[in-house]
Image: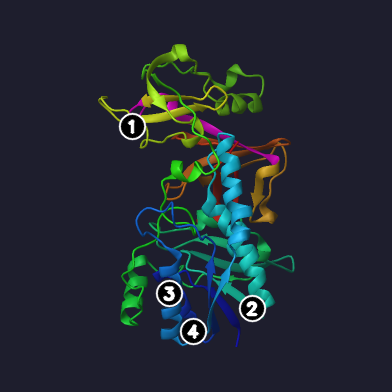
Amino acid sequence: MKKVIVGLSGGVDSSVSALLLKEQGYEVIGLFMKNWHDESLTISNDCPWLEDSNDAMLVANKLNIPFQTIDLSKEYQSRIINYMFDEYKMGKTPNPDILCNREIKFDIFLKLALNLGADYVATGHYCQVESFDKKNKKIYRLLSGDDHLKDQSYFLCQLTQKQLSKVIFPIGKLTKKDVREIAKKNDLITAEKKDSQGLCFVGKVKLPDFLKQKLIPKKGKVIKVDNNYIIAEIEESDFESNKSYLEFLCSPRNFSETDGECIGYHNGAFFYTVGQRKGLDIGGFKDPLFVLKKDIDKNILYVGMGSDHPALFKKALFISKKDIHWVRNDLTIQPNQSMEVYFRVRYRQPLEKGKIFMYKSGLFILFDRPISSIASGQFASWYIENELIGSGVIS
């Protein structure tokens, strides 16, 4: 009988995962990760760790499985929170949920579980793992969840073959409705519990307030760029090489204060992200304002009116060589090679068609159509059909 340690988060997804594994005959142990202590910055009582821990314990009691809590707050602080502060300070937009999966759940937690004698770990992610043999070697595939509205493969885009070999995702073929019905049928306390929101393990926070712990507010101008801002229409034939064309498409907008008018002030450009709509606190315009660019050096925010502002859209992105990660190492392409893929640059974004071009310095993804709000520091993931094969940090 194989032993599985389930990361019980106190939510319905991990609860049902534990239930299904027990029904399948595994020896199941529940483990709650306490990764955050400070509740002073959370909004109301959303996702307080104490309530989640208690719910996880009640589920374990209901299922009659062993349960314990581990404190990984020091590791979470050093690997996730400090990384967030450093990235925002440089003007980037990190994704702590992806980092949490790579650094905490499927690294520290996985190693701890294996040291405790577990054969596998399991979580309540909506995705799937399959394997096949290739040249006498087992290859693991990270597949999208069957519930396309809840597919969480994007959050796992940094996992490795070794990690995937030790992971089970019991609810990957289920819909959220199925999961809640199973929980309700088995009288689990988490059956009707709302999904957690906000930062992984921290909860729902006002990001500027959270970042103010280390980033000092600094007043700066908000410049509104007109919607008739002219973006040069240049064809690939205008460039001496495909690489120089792609570099041009990825280059940041070169706004200056003369490209618009000052309509207000902000408290720090690093508190915002490209494509952000809420939080500017500037009204009186026909359509909502969106962040087009943040100039960290001069502490200026450039904004545009409406979600269709031309400066919101880009046709390509670049990922530096050091930031490229292949889940499927056997599918890696070499410099001067290309690959047709589907990709996404944020969770719940529909998969888009594009083409990867690999060079010694890194890879470009050229989009079939312009995409809005490409933010440096976020992750892009790429797929073949419903299999996530690689990812990287957008430069």
**Disc on res. 22:** 4
Quadrant of the drawing holding the N terminus: bottom right
Task: Name the spot of residue 307 as percent of width and height, x first.
Answer: 35, 32
Disc on the earlier residue, 1 or 2: 2
Alpha carbon separation for disc pair 3 and 2: 26 Å
Disc on the earlier residue, 3 or 1: 3
**Disc on res. 119:** 2
Task: Name the spot of residue 367 as percent of width and height, x first.
Answer: 51, 36
Alpha carbon separation for disc pair 1 and 2: 51 Å
Of circles 3 and 4, the one toward us is 3
> Please, what is the three-letter code of the amino acid marked with disc 4?
Lys
Determine whether the residue tagged by mark 3 lies in a helix, strand or loop.
Answer: helix
- Please tell me whether residue 287 is drawn above or below residue 31 in the rendered image: above
**Span colored in magenta:** 305-321
Q: Is residue 384 visible?
A: no
> Please, what is the three-letter code of the amino acid marked with disc 3?
Asn
Disc on the earlier residue, 3 or 2: 3
**Disc on res. 281:** 1
Disc on the earlier residue, 2 or 4: 4
Determine whether the residue tagged by mark 1 lies in a helix, strand or loop.
Answer: loop
> Please, what is the three-letter code of the amino acid marked with disc 2?
Asp
Alpha carbon separation for disc pair 3 and 4: 20 Å
Q: Which residue is mark 3?
A: 54
> Please, what is the three-letter code of the amino acid marked with disc 1?
Asp
Q: Residue at point 59% right, 55% down?
A: 77
